[in-house]
Amino acid sequence: MQTLTTPPMLIPPMRPESLGVPLIDLKCQHQPIQHKIERAIQSVIQAEDFILGRALIDFEIAFAHASGSHYGVGVGSGTDAIALGLRACGIGQGDEVIVPANTFVATLIGVLQTGATPVLVDCDPNTALIDLMAAEKAITANTRAIVPVHLYGQMVSPRQLLDLAGTYDLLIFEDAAQSHLAEREGYRAGSVGLAAAFSFYPSKNLGALGDGGMVLTQEPHIAETMRSLRNYGAARKYHHIEFGVNSRLDTLQAAVLGVKLPYLPEWNSDRQRVAQHYQTLLAPLAGVGIVPMQNVSGTGHVYHLYVVRVTDDCAIDRSRLQVELETKGIQTGIHYPTPCHLQPAFQHLGYQLGDFPHTEQLCRQVLSLPMYPGLSDVQLHRVAATLATSLNLPLRPICADSVLFSN
Ligand SMILES: *Cc1c(COP(=O)(O)O)cnc(C)c1O
């Protein structure tokens, strides 16, 4: 009788990604509601209602209402929302617009597209938000507007903004691309200024399945101008009163966003849960140079990103730390590695290295840790534990899926 010998079982080497934690994971959001999303898409296809359709109008109303504003006008991207929104507010050539140096380049691109001159100012190194004292010093006779960026999900102080704008007769245009439903001092993001821009880029707190954006405003005449600007500058069909563009939020994308919007408060509080855990787990690392950005807005911070600083006295430099984490399957990001004023595209603005020391320092130090609704406790403990081991800190396990630092 022939004996069958089973070949020795090959144990596959442990793949780092099997223990991996991505920076962002959209599956947790989409899987439970995929059938609803598909149904919403089907109904737009059936109605052949692709441009400025019913689902867009419904979503504009719903999102404006959720954000404590009156009118919503959907556009093709967050960048277009800034550019067209500022134009609808009357900003253009000859105007100076105050912008934080510490932001994503789209803020600056939006301002430049209006023909206005962006005037950059430094940030507060603890929050990464615009420094309003620096903003005040930058005001001239030509300053018309300030564009606060509610960065990483945290709002710039509405009270201080309104004070400054009131004193110097500036209009406030919020860049709320990272702060859907964020709150501070009783205000929601997008309800502080004359108008505000949102982005629905897929990884934002509320994301489409592609590009999208919206302008919110309390003013009917600004909403009306926006509706014309995004639609070839036509107040009504074939009647063009302004030099407009083609930038409408697709009805298909609006239908998807309309399905997702009711879940946003839940998703934002899940981000806050993750942030709170990080806060506790990372507290012992402050002494060795890993310092989380400050939350100065309490429960209103919606944590688009969870950002720490790798300070200059940290035993390991940021790029080495990032590689070390990557090899252990922990994905991180840098928001942002090069400040706007040092990007080759904006050299003509005349800024140079040293102009905004806090912004420049943050660009060298910031590191974004995995953050998304659905990130499990096991995963975030793994991130914290991997950070600690990369810094050669001893770990004391307290139970199967969690770990404490001993210091
Ligand atoms: C994402 C983002 C934008 C641009 O939005 P898009 O939809 O990508 O054009 C603008 N400002 C900030 C702060 C952003 O994070």
Image (spheres, rainbow, N blue to C red):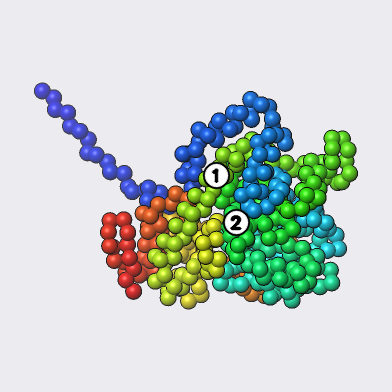
For residue 316, which quarter of the picture? bottom left
In the picture of the structure, the residue carrying the numbered disc 1 is: 262
Circle 1 or circle 2, nearest the eye: 1
At a point 31% along the width and 44% down the height, the residue shown is 12
How packed mark 2 is, by other alpha carbons closer than 10 Å (few <14, some 14-19, many 20 or more), is many
In the picture of the structure, the residue carrying the numbered disc 2 is: 179
Viewed as shown, does residue 249 lie left or right of 183? Answer: right
Q: Vertical placement of 225 versus 281: above or below?
A: above
Residue nearer the viewer, 373 or 330: 373
Where is residue 177? Give x, y as percent: 64, 54
Residue nearer the viewer, 400 or 331: 400
Viewed as shown, does residue 266 lie left or right of 40? Answer: left
Where is residue 403? Give x, y as percent: 32, 62
For residue 212, which quarter of the picture? top right
Q: Secondary structure at mark 2?
A: loop
Q: Mark 1 near ligand 1 (CB under 8 Å)?
A: no
| Amino acid type assigned to the residue bearing label 1 in the image | Pro
At a point 42% along the width and 70% down the height, the residue shown is 283
Q: Secondary structure at mark 1?
A: helix
Q: Vertical placement of 375 versus 406: above or below?
A: above
Q: Earlier in the sequence, mark 1 or mark 2?
A: 2
At a point 78% along the width and 49% down the height, the residue shown is 220
Where is residue 130? Give x, y as percent: 65, 68
